[in-house]
């Protein structure tokens, strides 16, 4: 409730038929519903079912890039398929290579929640396939202007506080 306009736009971007990957950023102050809004799409089986791979990662939980990329691999590889042998001891570049290898030729949707680091895009873009023509999508939530300025982006949604009448309906 209160996000109908945003939702319509984001669904259009997720389903627009473009073969190039695109990055949608949900930007706003703390508590404005960026994460809650993004989760609506993550759990929407009709929209997300069109992708062969999906992952939700709360980026602010990681201080170490190696742990972040290990976690990504664990998200991608689920029973009965295990992550690559030795991934727990791999260095950063090897982990990035494994993530890139996994995503190659897949139509994926990745949700990166609560991104704070302005270096995030520089780290993650190396793992995205250079020639991904599968229509993959990335959604990033952030409250930091620096993240918005440094990320490649196709679409930006500035999440605004709910109007008082809408907020009252939610109670």
Image (tube, rainbow, N blue to C red):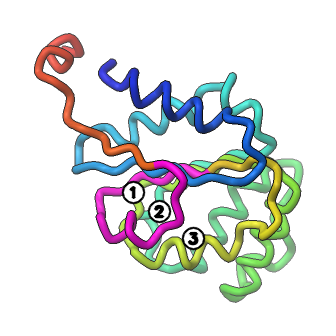
Tell me the residue at 69%/88% (across/down): 91
Look at mark 3 in the image and give the residue it sits on: 68
On whether residue 7 falls in the magenta region, the answer is no
Range of residues picked out in magenta: 138-155
Residue designated by label 2? 59
Q: Secondary structure at mark 1?
A: strand
Q: Residue at x 75, y 68 (%)?
A: 99
Q: Determine which residue is flagged by label 1.
A: 114
Pointer 1 local density, CA inside 10 Å: few below 14, some 14–19, many at least 20: many
Mark 2 and mark 3 lie on one chain; the one further toward the N terminus is 2
- Do callouts 1 and 2 mark residues in contact (Cβ within 8 Å)? yes
Please tell me which residue is depicted at 46% across the width and 27% down the height of the picture.
Answer: 7
Alpha-carbon span between mark 2 and mark 3:
7 Å
The structure residue drawn at horizontal position 39% and vertical position 25%, both measured from the top left corner, is 5
Residue 145: mark in rendering:
none
Quarter containing the C terminus = top left
How many C-alpha atoms fall within 10 Å of the one at disc 2: few (<14), some, or many (≥20)? Answer: many
Disc 3 from disc 1: Cα separation: 13 Å
Q: CA distance from mark 1 to mark 2?
A: 6 Å
Kindly check if marks 2 and 3 are in contact, taking CB atoms under 8 A apart as contact.
Answer: yes
């Amino acid at each position: 409730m209160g996000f109908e306009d945003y939702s319509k736009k984001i669904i259009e971007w997720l389903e627009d038929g473009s073969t190039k990957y695109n990055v949608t950023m949900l930007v706003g102050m703390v508590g404005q519903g960026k994460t809650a809004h993004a989760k609506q799409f993550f759990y929407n089986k009709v929209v997300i079912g069109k992708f062969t791979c999906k992952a939700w990662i709360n980026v602010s939980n990681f201080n170490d890039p190696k742990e972040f990329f290990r976690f990504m691999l664990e998200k991608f590889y689920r029973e009965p398929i295990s992550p690559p042998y030795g991934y727990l001891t791999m260095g950063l570049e090897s982990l990035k290579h494994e993530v890139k290898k996994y995503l190659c030729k897949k139509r994926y949707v990745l949700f990166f929640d609560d991104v704070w680091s302005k270096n995030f895009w520089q780290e993650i873009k190396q793992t995205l396939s250079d020639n991904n023509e599968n229509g993959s999508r990335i959604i990033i939530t952030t409250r930091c202007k620096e993240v918005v300025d440094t990320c490649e982006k196709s679409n930006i949604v500035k999440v605004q506080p709910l109007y008082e009448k809408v907020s009252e309906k939610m109670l």
